[in-house]
Image (spheres, helix red, strand yellow):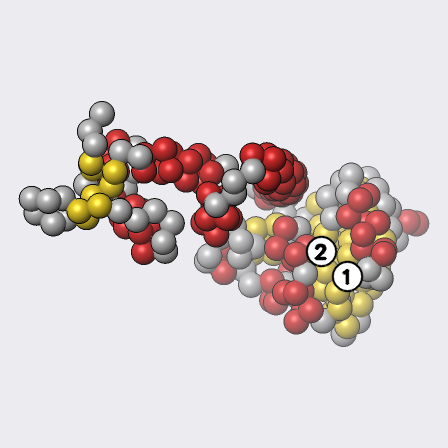
Amino acid sequence: MKKQYTVGQLASLFEMDPQLLRHYDSVGLLSPNTRNEQNNWRVYDYSQIEKLATIRYLRKLDFPLKKIEEYLHMTDYGDSLQTLQMQSEFLHNQADKLLQLDNIIQKKLNFIKQENQLLNLNPFIKKYYPERTCIMFGEEEMLYRHDLYFFHPTIVIRQGEQKSFGAYLFDDEEELLEDARKDGVQIEIIPEGCYLCTYHTGDYESFEESVELLKSEHPELKLDDTVIAINVIDQFVVSDIEKYRTEIQIQILPDEVRE
């Protein structure tokens, strides 16, 4: 092994970007500690290879640079082992969170796929739904402060002139519901029943046009006054507002259900 290494040589040894070494130098984490007698360039000693290896090891374990600096100054291996144990617990927690996020992504993908299968069918269809649950936040401006807005389809429940906005829940989310109850968030139960449905294309704010068209197509049915609008293809899926898809649902009153 060489006794001295330039920035480029040491970076090549670890197959890393030389700029990263320069960054370590700038923050005082690992600085060249000798100078080449021939050209006066600052170079790394052979003894610094193990220190860089430790830095790279800790970065692969997702340690931030500040924590790495603290770790490098530990003289008791018991403290080092405790720090590694704490990082292991942190990574386990992060992994759990990532799995939860992936679970939400998969549920949303399945939801969109199921709904998309119906987009090319009869534009006005009857669908039976079991009792469903959603979490309501009230005015539209209240949506953006809740994580559920980002991870669940937005639901709008219109009763007369009043609109309430919330998050449409997927199946098997009892833990989420329990947390909502503890936080005092309003939980809305969408009743079981047969619904007359259609899909509105474009800006969801104009879905009233599709509501009126839906009603006019089936004047023989007695429909509930409550209108439910659930975003299927939204701004998180496509940027073109003209390609948004919103499902419109109006419950058919029980004595008026037709097969």
Specify which label sits upstream in the sequence, 1 or 2: 1
Find numbered disc 2 in the image and state the secondary structure of the residue it sits on: strand
Density class for disc 2 (Cα within 10 Å; few <14, some 14-19, many ≥20) is many
Residue 200 in percent (x, y) is at 61, 56
Residue at the image position 60 percent from the left and 62 percent from the top: 204
Residue at the image position 82 percent from the left and 60 percent from the top: 183
| 139 vs 51: above or below | below
In the rendered image, which quarter is residue 142 located in?
A: bottom right
Outermost residue, top side: 1
Find numbered disc 1 in the image and state the secondary structure of the residue it sits on: strand
Please indicate whether residue 64 sits to the left or right of residue 96 in the image.
left
Judging depth in this view, the residue of 125 and 186 nearest the camera is: 186
Residue 87 in percent (x, y) is at 59, 40
Residue at the image position 72 percent from the left and 52 percent from the top: 168
| 248 vs 164: above or below | above
Circle number at residue 249: none
Residue 4 in percent (x, y) is at 20, 36
**Residue type beneath disc 1:** Met
Density class for disc 1 (Cα within 10 Å; few <14, some 14-19, many ≥20) is many
Circle number at residue 167: 2
Q: Number of marks in the image? A: 2
Circle number at residue 136: 1
Outermost residue, bottom side: 161
Q: CA distance from mark 1 to mark 2?
A: 6 Å
Please indicate whether residue 1 sits to the left or right of residue 121 in the image.
left
Q: Is residue 202 visible?
A: yes
**Residue type beneath disc 2:** Ala
> Which quadrant of the rendered structure holds the C terminus?
top right
Residue 218 in percent (x, y) is at 75, 54
